[in-house]
Amino acid sequence: MTRDDRWQGYPPEVVAWLGALWGKSAKKAGGTKNLLLSHMLDTAAVAELAWDSYLPPVTRWRLDDLAGGPGKGRRLFAWLCGIHDCGKATPAFQHVDAEAAEAVLAAGLTWDKYALKGASWRHDKAGGRLLLRILGDAQWSQEQIAWVWPLVAGHHGSFPTRGQLKPKKEALQGRGKDWPRAQLALVEAFTRALGYEGQTPLADVEPVRVPSRAVQLQLSGFVVMTDWIASNEQHFKGIDDLPMVTMPRARERAASAWAKLGLRGGWGRLPLPGVKAFQDRFGHGPWLSQELLLDVVRRMGGPGLVIFEAPMGEGKTKAALAAAEMLAARCGADGVFVGMPTQATSDPMFSQVRAWLERLGSGLESQVALLHGKRMFNKEWRRLLDGAGEWGQDADGCYASVAEDEPDEYGMASPFGDAGSASQRKAPAEWFLGRHRGLLSPFAVGTIDQLLYAATRTKHVMLRMSGLVGKVVVLDEVHAADVYMSQFLLEGLWWLGQAGVAVVLLSATLPPDQRQQLVAAYMAGAQSAEGFETVEIPEPDGYPSVTAVWLGEEGPEHLVESTTPWREDLSVRVEILPETPGTGAGAGTRPAVAPADQAVVTLLESRLAAGGCVLIIRNTVPRAQATFEALQEVYGADVRLLHGRLHAGHRADRTQEALNLLGPATNGVQRPQRLILVATQLAEQSFDVDADLLITDLAPVDLLLQRIGRLHRHHREKRPALLAEPTVVVTGIALHDDGPPWILRPGEKIYGRYLMLRTAAVVAEADGGTWQVPGQVPELVSRVYGDGDLVPAGWRSAELKARQEWELRQEQRRQAAAQYLLTRGGEHEAATLEGLHYGGHGTLAEGQFEALVRDGERSVEVVLLRRDDKGVHAVGGRRLGPGGEVAAGLVDDVLAGTVRLPTGLTLVAEQELGPLAGWRDHPWLRYSRALVLDERGQAVLGDFRLRYDDLLGLVVEGGPRHR
């Protein structure tokens, strides 16, 4: 046998130790144990491929800089990733598998089994402790050691404090002379295998700079990612013969696994787009506002924050994508994340981004991930999953070895009480492989929640951050974030600012204070500062406008410019349809038509005499259902209903029908002579319908203006004569001569009395007059959200009380969010990731994440099914198996029954509902709750009576908290 010269100079006992220390047990590595050195080299080899084929250019530039110059970053990156499991060279880990432990003991590394019995010491923390000693002995500076050890100690999702790196018993880490020698030998052997030479190879590894904390978090995510890939037992079967453990062999294994994985980067080094790029991408030249955005981006001195405010229909999304391409070329970003306000708005954006990439001709349109809880309903997304094979929905089981000493490490245990089920203990594939690849895809479209999750102190947050850093981030409709949600947005912007990520924020308009907060948060991050101090920038003096800020050589710099919209202002008549207390009703709760609904019926009798299309927006589902029923009695099939308690199938069909019937005149569909669409806030944003008349419940002025954006939205040669003047009729309010107005209570509960009172003031002021839209939009928003006197004298005491309550509630919500933010107060200026997760909130399921970053009471979704004497069937009629088993061709039919329950039913639904027995092993249904209705479409849930009506949707009656 050929002598292995790598081990010359090592004492025989050290070689024996390296040939025995194991990283993956035989049962977790394809039948043969994998030596620890083998797994570390496998991981380093994966990291090399990630460098070559995946890492954004800007990340490679930064790593080269850290390592001391061009060409040096690749090896440092491979070392940082591969060293992650050095803490397995401890008795605490080596004794876990009895068969593998025998070989370790036979090689001369021993332990006190009684000291180890019942004691726990995780290998990630052990690795952090080990590096503190070894790197210190190698004469690394303390500042370099301080940022590197948390990458190892935190590679299973949480960063401990230095004080947490001490085991309860030193025997767990390894006592005596042999264990420290074996640990050093392992680290040195690994280091030499990567090409570091000399008597002290570890000294050559030491970085020359300390990266920002945000870049450390990104690198930590890549450590996790490469570890997981190298832990796939199908492609990294165990090697237990030390002479066979080499870097060339590891590279062969990694290349095979990487090819099967299909993970790839995005643009790479992108050339700067030419002057005709916009025309090439979108089929027309840019409008004035779009050109303004691109011009400002061209003139920016570096990556920064760009806020583009423009009216609905101004083409903000196209402009943002064009700007993202330009920013990526300038800043070395490799892709784009587009965050939308809702799941419903994410789907069309997903299609738009894929079409945009297709026009770039780079073949990247297949690399776009769709990220939201209902993505399985999107047929375009489902088509991309075809052929995912072993790396797709069934890939999870290949990673059992990632945490052999940490049961259910990834928090994937079933929420329904069967945590022992192997099918529920899923790990890496749930995060980034196949259909769950998520933010680690070069291009991603999803809800803004994906960014907000990255700003939470939760496990594996580094994976989310590594999926954002290196992209251009585009967030649409940021004005929709309330004060609670805004805390996570601001925290996320701080980290993106520190990471030098270019961010483009889109909004119809922003209150001045909110604009300043967004700028301050980003620039505080760019300067690694604790306080979100105000950056002195002027207010835009026109509309549309672009505000851009970035960190220059001497501090913050800015550009603030504006232009005119592409179309003229719409003169919108404002009317109030008075409503008085007690006139509202909910579906199924009234003996006759409520006066509030009758008032709408009466109004439409005159306004629709010559036909026309009306959009009615109600603030609650029961109110929308009641209005629909009242109008249907008069107008029959000319009335449609759209709200959030329709099951997914009905909601999708009705949304598409509305878009077809009331969309642009160019869509080829005949506009109906008369149509009334009753909807909730679903019709408030990113809903391209054109109404001749708008009737809407009172809402805060920015949302009210969003709703007005559906009024006379598209050019039409002719509208019904009685509706030729664009008119908004505001309901849910009644004015009084001698005091504040009455405002419908559910609206106040949703939006708060203070903003509703101030909005009511500007509506009352305009009653019978007009607003110029969009020209007056910034003025109206500034007046309502500003501090100036606005309400009539008779309202002021009520306004003062409402303001005090509002400010108290705002502060409570800020404090409620603070406990979940990624950075604890006073720690934004910390230099490393040490203790980042102290006081954190562990691993959360996706639904729990949503509740974490969005204020309000939790709600749950259920899948509606029906039961008759023949068994259970989907809402469309197709039958399930005896235990609820779902054939592949039936999945869409079952998921079409998904509906969200009112918040008052959350607790009882969580207690009483779960998946059907036949769903336990289904990749998409195993976490779903089934609500089985009887033949009449009814069910009882706790004290509530539920029924699903094909016209009204879900109707809830009874219960102590009927809402």
Image (cartoon, rainbow, N blue to C red):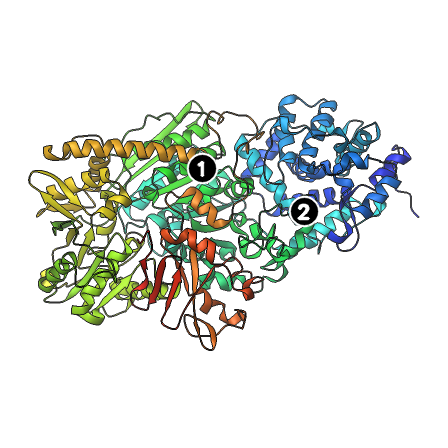
- Marks 2/1: CA distance? 29 Å
Q: Position of residue 552 (x, y in %)?
A: 43, 27
Q: Residue at x 27, y 41 (%)?
A: 509
Q: Nearer the viewer, residue 653 or 736?
A: 736
Q: Give the image location of residue 52, x and y in percent.
A: 63, 45
**Marks 2 and 1 in Cβ contact (< 8 Å):** no
* Image coordinates for residue 313, horizontal then vertical, percent: 28, 52
Up-down relation of residue 874 to residue 311 (above or below): below
In the image, farthest residue toward the right: 1
Say which amino acid is labelled 1.
Gly
To which residue does mark 1 refer? Answer: 492
Q: Residue at x 65, y 37 (%)?
A: 77
Residue 425 appears in the rendering:
yes
- The answer to which of 292 and 342 lies nearer the viewer is 342
Q: Nearer the viewer, mark 2 or mark 1?
A: 2
Give coordinates of residue 526: x percent, y percent.
45, 29
Q: Which mark is residue 402?
A: 2
175 horizontally vs 542: left or right? right
Q: Residues within 10 Å of mark 1 (few under 14, many from 20)?
A: many
Q: Nearer the viewer, residue 181 or 327?
A: 181
